[in-house]
Amino acid sequence: MAITVVKPEDIEKRSMEIITSELNGRTWPEPQFSIVKRCIHTSADFDYADNLKFSKDAENIGVQAIRNGAHIVTDTKMAAAGINKNKLKEYGGEVHCFISDDDVVKAAKERGCTRATICMEKGAEIAKDHPVIFAIGNAPTALVRLAELIDSGELKPALIIGAPVGFVNVVESKELIMDRDVPYIVPVGRKGGSNIAATICNAMMYYKG
């Protein structure tokens, strides 16, 4: 099989053309379509065409939140690294990952819970002053704590991207968020990950509509 010569600046464009072609005419309203394509592009996994679930108007709510200066709180350094911080800063937002903060490590040890749980509590404090998008790419316990904070009235998130990956409580934690009256974007089932959480954030940032 011959290697196709593609200019560096055209690689992403060509990738998106291939993805669109292999979707065989399937489309979504924008910006959902951009989010779906970028998740497939990041993972080379066409399952995201079927497993990404959006609450009513969540994609537009997320785009508008970013343009209004939303901060993004994530549970992993990998997701934080993957989010385009410079682009987010143009809108007045910041990315936060507290997972290695000394106070988080100490509190998690004292309370016998995961560090991701404490991170969500710190994120809820930011949400008192700013719109916050929670981008979860690893820990089901982060989604469980977000559901508890929502139920207690301590948190009203701008959007939750619920994309933990794995086998223990992953499906159940996603369902907890989908059962709440909050905007969400969730890849149902076991799939997800920090790269997907970051990709969804970036797709909303890059959308030009």
Image (cartoon, rainbow, N blue to C red):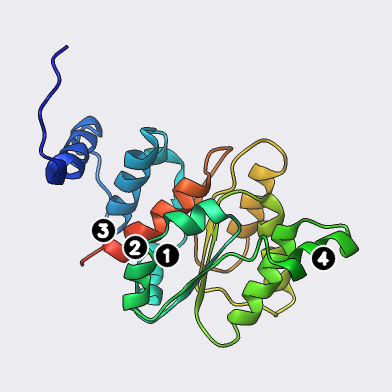
Q: Which residue is mark 3?
A: 30
Is residue 153 positioned above or below 17 on the image? below
Q: Which residue is at a point 48% across and 53% down the rendered structure image?
A: 197
Q: Position of residue 76 (x, y in %)?
A: 58, 55
Q: Under tag 2, what secondary structure?
A: helix
Q: Which residue is mark 4?
A: 106
Q: Secondary structure at mark 1?
A: helix
C-alpha span from label 3 to label 1 = 11 Å
State which quadrant residue 123 falls in.
bottom right
Mark 2 vs mark 3: give the one in front. Answer: 2
* Mark 2 to mark 3 CA distance (whole Å): 10 Å
Work out whether mark 2 precedes mark 1 in sequence or the reverse, and give the earlier one: 1
The quarter of the rendered structure image containing the N terminus is: top left
Which label's residue is closer to the chain start, 3 or 1?
3
Considering only order in the chain, which callout, 4 or 1, is on the residue closer to the N terminus?
1
Mark 2, residue position: 204
Which amino acid type corresponds to the residue marked 1 in the rendered image? Ala
